[in-house]
C-alpha cells in the first residue's frame, strides 16, 4: 500500500513547519490503518487527533506568517478554516455511516487535502518565511 510520504520538494524552508507537515502525513497514514482495521487505535481517536493537530498547526503557521508580514495571510487563514470544515464534514459522514467512507477514499481525500495545500499555498510563503527565526529550533 502506498502511504503518503513527505519529500524534500514539500519543504517550506522552516524546519518546524516541515515537522508539522510530516506529523499530519503520519496521522493521515494512521487513519488509513485504523480504517483498514490494522491499528489498535480507533478511527474516532485518530480523526480527533488529526483535527486537533490540524488546528494546532494552522494556528502556529498563521503566527509565523504574521511575524514575517506575509501579505496573503488573510486569504491563507480563510483556506485553513475551510480545510478544518472539510475534515469535520468527513468525520460527520463517517459517524452517520462508517461504510460510506472507505479507507482508500479517506486516504485519497486527505492526501489531496494536504498536498494541494502545501504545494499550492504553503510553498508560496517560503520566500517570506525562509531564514525567519524558527522558534522550534532556537
Ligand atoms: Fe497553510
Ligand atoms: Fe501548513
Image (cartoon, grey):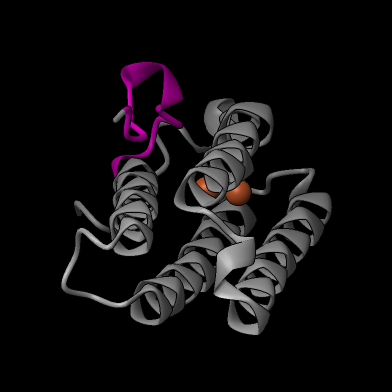
Q: Residue 107 appears at what percent x and percent y? A: 48, 45
Could you tell me residue 88's position as x and y percent? 66, 74
> Range of the magenta residues?
2-15
> In this view of the protein, which residue sits in the foreground, 126 or 9?
9
Q: Residue 34: image x %, image y %?
A: 31, 64
Q: In this view, does 2 lie to the left or right of 68?
A: left
Rendered-image quadrant of the N terminus: top left
Q: Quadrant of the C terminus?
A: bottom left
Residue shown at 83%/51% (left/top)?
75
In the picture as drawn, the residue positioned furthest to the front comes out as 99
Which residue appears at 34% of the width and 57% of the height? 27
Q: Is residue 4 magenta?
A: yes
Instruction: Please identify the dominant SS of the magenta region.
Output: loop
Quarter occupied by residue 128 = top right
- Image quadrant in which you'd find residue 118: top right
- For the point 41% across and 17% down, the residue is 9
Q: Which of 53 and 33 is in front in this view?
A: 33
Give 85 or 133, whichever is nearer the viewer: 85
- The front one of 90 and 62 is 90
For residue 52, above or below residue 82: below
At 69% from the left and 44% from the top, the residue drawn is 70
Question: Furthest residue to the top?
Answer: 9
> How many numbered marks are there?
0
Look at the image and say whether residue 132 sits in the magenta stretch: no
Q: In the image, 24: left or right of 72?
A: left
Q: Is residue 51 left or right of residue 72?
A: left
Amino acid at each position: 500500500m502506498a502511504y503518503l510520504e513527505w519529500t524534500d520538494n514539500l519543504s517550506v524552508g522552516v524546519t518546524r513547519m516541515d515537522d508539522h507537515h510530516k506529523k499530519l502525513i503520519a496521522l493521515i497514514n494512521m487513519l488509513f490503518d485504523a480504517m483498514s482495521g490494522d491499528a489498535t487505535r480507533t478511527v474516532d481517536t485518530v480523526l480527533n487527533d488529526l483535527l486537533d493537530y490540524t488546528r494546532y498547526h494552522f494556528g502556529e503557521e498563521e503566527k509565523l506568517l504574521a511575524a514575517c508580514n506575509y501579505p496573503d495571510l488573510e486569504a491563507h487563514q480563510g483556506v485553513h478554516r475551510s480545510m478544518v470544515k472539510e475534515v469535520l464534514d468527513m468525520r460527520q459522514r463517517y459517524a452517520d455511516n462508517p461504510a460510506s467512507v472507505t479507507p482508500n477514499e479517506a486516504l485519497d481525500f486527505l492526501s489531496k487535502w494536504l498536498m494541494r495545500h502545501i504545494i499550492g499555498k504553503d510553498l508560496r510563503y517560503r520566500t517570506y518565511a525562509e531564514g525567519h527565526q524558527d522558534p522550534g529550533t532556537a
